[in-house]
Amino acid sequence: MRVTRRGWMAAGLGLTGGLAGGLASPTSLARAAPDPAPAANRPLPPPRLEILSKSGHDYTSALHSLSAYAQAELAALGLPGMTLSVTDLDGFAATLSLGWADRERAIPVRPHHRFQIGSISKSFIALTVLSLVDEGRLSLDSPAAALLPDAPWPDAPITLAHLLSHVAGLADDAPIFPRTPDGRLWSGFAPGSSFSYSNTGYRLLGAMIARATDLPFQAAVAARVRDKLGLQTIAGVIDEARRAEFAVGYWPADQSDDGGELPRSPLEMAYWTPEDNAAGSVGATSGEMAFYIRALARFARGEGAPVLSNALARRFTTPVIAAGEFGPGARYAMGVAVIPVDGEDCLHHTGGMMSFSSSFHADAKEGVAAFASVNARLGAYRPRVTTAYAVRLIRAVRRGQALPPPPDPLAPFRVKAPQAWAGRYVGPSGEFHLVVRGGDLRLAADGVEAATLPVGADRITTDHPRLIRHGLDAVRDNAGIVGLWWGETLYGRDGPRPQPVPAAGLIPLRGVYLNRDPWVGGAEIFARGESLVLAGLGELIAHGDEWRLKQDPGGVERARFDAPLNGVMTRLNVSGADLIRLSV
């Protein structure tokens, strides 16, 4: 799958590290863009700092360091703009506006610009549900099917608490009424036993809120959370009426090639996508988010007023399950994750929309928090390194310590242990070399050297013109990497390898499938010998009339092929949504 709200099965970049070291050269991993538009080359405007309120701490030096780093990140990755906010529990709040809100018209980001915060919206949903629990109108232990009887629930014993913590086993982005043989949802594991992020679960929570309150979910969220926190101006949905308030969003200009989301890949203006979705449809300014993340930090201290009782505020922010997709050591509570930054727990969440990427960190113990949003999508990038660095800077000021050095903005985009990949790879129509230059893995072929990008432990992509179309999947044995798959072509390390013949039964299934809904996106299916592979996600294993990812034997995500015509399947159903085979 190329595009989903999270990236199906969290198959995107592991953007969790990068909190040590100095600033890297923006060109070391930069994609060479042919003749980019003049607007894309326009230098960033001067950043704008606004102090909204003061406390007893002078954060001037920290804010200057944060601004310098954020500008370096925008430049290194080729992103248009960023809005930032920093706050503490003593009353301080400040915003930073960087880059372009509209690159083509040279409009800088300003504090009044709204950015789409994506899945950070889930915390608003969780708070609304918990407010209803506080009143006794809902129960965390109630069966979900009893709270929303019209939905096609699976037989698994899913509770309200399971949905809030993404432990129900529901698919990431299945339609509430999926096109499946029985028309029902399913659970890929025993509820409560594992973590699997599910936007479907939060859409169902939105419907539960509406049923319990007799209000549209966004109206209930406004009355129960935003209004009580003094955040009446936040946009609860992304609609045409408020479009002019938002920064312009950008996405990769080439969304068909696997190499199109490397740092400094060409970006183009995205089309406007209205959203009225409980899984993520909030638009906010940096100032509004400063006061919201301050409230989240108070909730983590067990101070629930004016939204929750203290007991449920603690429940809201108490983690219940490991959630590695948010980073090493991350756990998930209810609508928020908890992750260590330098060994100290912070509330954390990210948000990805079609053309916006967001993050926040809040250290309740130290009483500091930061939010950032970028008006662009670039793979699985989120500005989490920026918000974690902001927390580290503000902590240092409060503790009288030296400010930490800036992170390397390109660290999350570098192949780890590049020497393990380095070598000569030979295929039926040529060869290429993977070489290490200054610690970076580069791909050299046809007299051209290009960047690489890690996508999980066993996959890299490149912007090399010959190989940009597909990623490169490692073939390993006990000695390490012995070959690389590129589509259905096998390249051998240090010499050619036999090309496996696709199994006859798999040939009708392979191909490119597409759904015009950008949240569903597309899938490319390969037949590699006896193995059926979903590009970017790995091998599929047959389970009766459906297929599941090898690493997901319970089948949180499920695929089915049907509608044969002239000997090939013309339709691929992925977790209840149809994709149609492309014939070109």
Image (spheres, rainbow, N blue to C red):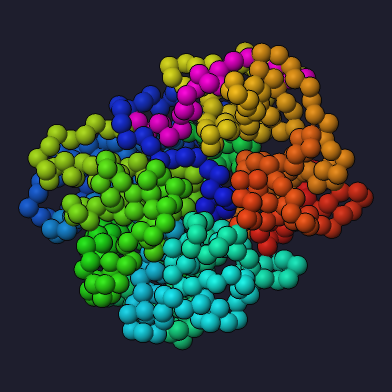
Indicate left or right for 71 with 467 as reference: left
Residue at the left extreme of this rendering: 56
Residue located 82% across and 43% down the image: 506
Examine the rendering and report whether any part of residue 575 can be seen.
yes
Above or below — where is 142 with respect to 191?
below
Q: Position of residue 534 (x, y in %)?
A: 68, 44
Above or below — where is 193 with respect to 127?
above
The verdict on residue 194 being magenta is: no
Examine the rendering and report whether any part of residue 373 can be seen.
no
Residue located 66% across and 17% down the image: 493
Q: Where is residue 107 in the image (x, y as percent from the top left)?
A: 38, 48
Above or below — where is 25 with respect to 17?
above
Indicate left or right for 291 with 220 as reference: left
Quarter of the image for the C terminus: give it: top right
Q: Where is residue 28 in the image (x, y as percent from the top left)?
A: 44, 23
> How many tags in the picture?
0
Residue located 82% across and 35% down the image: 502
The verdict on residue 415 being magenta is: yes
Q: Nearer the viewer, residue 328 or 255?
A: 328
User: Which picture quadrant has residue 271?
Assistant: bottom right
Residue located 58% across and 29% down the image: 462
User: Which picture quadrant has residue 228?
Assistant: bottom left
Q: Where is residue 150 in the image (x, y as percent from the top left)?
A: 60, 81
Q: Nearer the viewer, residue 268 or 470?
A: 470
Q: What stretch is highlighted in magenta?
A: 408-428
User: Which picture quadrant has residue 225?
Assistant: bottom left
Indicate left or right for 494 with 368 as reference: right
